[in-house]
Image: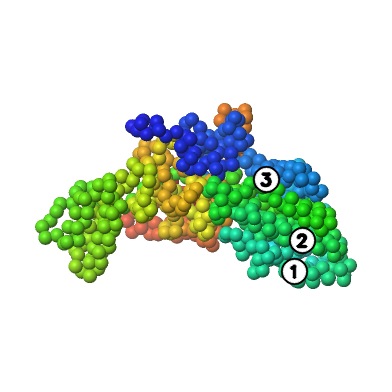
Amino acid sequence: MANTEEKNNWGIESSDTLYHISRWGDGYFSINELGHLTILPHQDKGKPSIDIMDIIEEVKNEGISLPVVIRFHDILRSQVVNLNRTFRDVIEEAEYHGRYYGVYPIKVNQMREVVEEIVDAGMPFNYGLEAGSKTELLSVIAFNQNQQALTILNGHKDTELLKLALLGRKIGRNVFVVIEKFSELLSLLDLSQEMNVPPLLGIRAKLSVKGTGQWSESGGEKAKFGLTIPEILKAVNLLKETNQSDSLKLLHFHIGSQISDIRVIKDAVKEGARIYAKLVKMGMPIEYFDVGGGLGIDYDGSRSTSDSSTNYSIWNYAEDIVYNLQQICDLEDVEHPHIISESGRAVTALHSCVITKVIDTISTSFPDNPIPKKTGEHILVENMREIMELLDEENYQEIYNDALENKAEAINAFKLGILSLEERATVETIFWKIAERINTILAKSDFVPEGLSGLEYITSPQYLCNFSVFQSLPDSWAIDQLVPIVPIMRLHERPTIPCTLADITCDSDGKINRFIDMKRDRHTLLLHNLQPDQDYYIGFFLTGAYQDVMGDNHNLFGRVNEVHVFFDDSDPSFYYIEEMIPGETCENVLTAMQYNARSMASTVKKLLNRQVQRGKLLPRESVRLMDFFETCLRGYTYLKK
Ligand SMILES: *Cc1c(COP(=O)(O)O)cnc(C)c1O
């Protein structure tokens, strides 16, 4: 390696610090001595690890192209166990009288394999499922095999959906219908009489406590779901009058997803606990206290209250729920209810990642050779030359400001017709050369002055990556969600290129220019220089919740290939791939958009035939072109290079 010196003062620990791997990785990710990113399925550095490069090689050998989603089923199982064990342990420690009955909300990742794995791992804990729509309830009724586990139905409901819930009751499932608006209660009571099965009723309360961040509107008075206190009392009276109080078994609230501040959770639990206690005292036999979702993930590793982080652990979360609920129940002298949480993000986010390849660099280019001085040059051009000559290691900040100002003046002059096209080009070229030199100076110093942090951004190249932000990281585009992005390889080498990322859609929003950092907004990511003879792979991590299933077909890029990886102690690489699921072909995506790929092919075939008849194309060539068209239709939507 040419830069042995650099290699020497850069180790895998330096990469760990730079990419914050230990901070967001929750013990599941590490770096091996080859400089490759690895998975630790047991969250234990003393146990075997899986080298992600091994998986990439195997996938490539199987003819599966990138981008590819890798699912680590062991992480999924481990998260289910962690959540359930934590609640069990905290409940035991607190000597709390109720039990924990978690449910997994399948909207967070509805992939059948994901739901099956969660149900299986959750079996010993009677871990249940939550549905928020008709289609979800159809699958949840079928998949929630454990008769002890709960099934919870949230969301807006029509008669059909309520009937479906009662059907679940008929076949022995504990389907709780959570009433989101008053009219649902009336329909449900009518239907249950008609179908002759008592419902299991829950009520979603609109708390005054609001979440923070992106989903703050899920709580508070203006929330889309839930009953206000007067409505809850109206419901209670109705149940009493019709002698159906016995059906009300559950109190629910949900104040939003990714709650970053533990204090908000505490406040919500306290408010909810009071409502629970008062209802019990009114004679409502509520047994379950459902705190909804909101358990967050520390995407940026900062352990802070920023939108992409959380200032608490799962343990803190369980503690705050159990102890606060216990305290208020004891004060109010009511039974401790069983606790339900509908944590989806925390269960699934860590288990999957998207791997892709950097395929090119996009950078502002300008002629390398010096620009010869001409006689009679415009003063703005002359100024720019002088500014460049004055630049040294002391005055770069001042020089940069002067250069910016002179460039702005030159562009104005051009607009007024005073500066020629060539002169403008000269001014811009010199400006970029100045910027480049300042960058070189900055690279050597640890300190970047405030005014110059933007310089790195505007002069940094974009690494073009074979993926679509809209398909694989929709929350990055829609709500500025940060995700950790890390090279899979060369982590023992110093990365030297500050860059931003661009995807292959033709949408200018298809880019990533915000990256995780402990202190401030980071607009560039340090990656390695690309080498002509070596592929360069990067990964987007913590994509298992929402991102995985919400992606859209912008530009007709479809779902990506995916592989399901299991840890295996007896395998030399410590893993095996259980399943490879091909991503969408161009034909699939077109069909979903109502195109008929067959008739498109036959149109092209007709046109080719016509050219053959006209003597403009050889028959042999026409057949070859037709084959090529059909191969493309059947092929992957992403770039093949
Ligand atoms: C979305 C949602 C959840 C899941 O929330 P997470 O923050 O992902 O755990 C739980 N309950 C309800 C009612 C939801 O709408």
Q: Secondary structure at mark 1?
A: helix
| Residue for badge 1 | 229
Name the foreground residue: 189 vs 288.
288
Q: CA distance from mark 1 to mark 2?
A: 12 Å
Q: CA distance from mark 3 to mark 2?
A: 23 Å
- Please tell me which of labels 1 and 2 falls first in the chain: 1
Farthest residue to the left: give it: 375
Tell me the number on the disc at residue 274: 2
Q: How is the image coloured?
A: rainbow
The amino acid pointed to by label 3 is Trp
| Residue for badge 3 | 315
Name the foreground residue: 622 vs 133.
133
The amino acid pointed to by label 2 is Arg
Q: Secondary structure at mark 2?
A: helix
The amino acid pointed to by label 1 is Ile
Name the foreground residue: 547 vs 215.
215
Q: CA distance from mark 1 to mark 3?
A: 31 Å
